[in-house]
Image: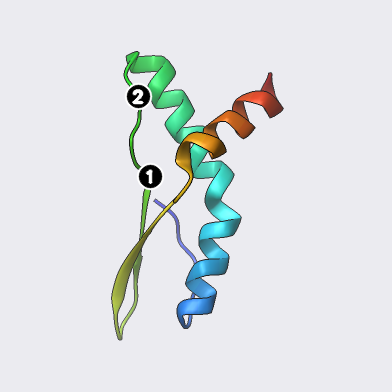
Amino acid sequence: YKTDRVGGEADVDAAVARYRWQGAAYALAAGLTTGRPVRDCLFLFCGPEAAGERRIADLDEAVREVHSAVG
């Protein structure tokens, strides 16, 4: 779970960009632990006025980047 303050759509997009590698690191760890591919990483954004979700669009690439970085 993440906590963050986001206002509009641009804030949500920026938050997903900030959390991209973190989500990919979780996906990498889960995949290595279970031996099964992780197909999706979904962030939920909830606020008093609205709620929404965003996926890491290029999860496989993000996982490769994280794996390479921690080598």
Image height of 25 relative to 54, above or below: above
Reply above or below: 60 against 29: below
Task: Tell how many labels.
Answer: 2
Image check: 9 left or right of 20? left
Query: Residue at coordinates 39% horizontally, 16% vertically from top-left?
Result: 33
Disc 1 target residue: 41
Residue 5 seen by the camera? no
- Is disc 1 placed on a helix, strand or loop? loop
Foreground of the two, 56 or 52:
56
For residue 31, which quarter of the picture? top left
Residue 37: give its label.
2
Residue 5 drawn at (x, y percent): 49, 73
Note whether residue 17 is visible.
yes
Instruction: Tell me the kind of residue under disc 1.
Output: Cys
Comparing 3 with 52, the one in front is 52
The residue under the point 48% across, 82% down is 7
Tag 2, which secondary structure?
loop
Q: Is residue 35 above or below residue 23?
A: above
Residue at 60 percent across and 57 percent down: it is: 18
Residue 50 occupies which quadrant of the picture?
A: bottom left
Q: Count neighbours of disc 1 (C-alpha within 10 A) and say few if under 14, some if 14 to 19, many if 20 or more.
A: some
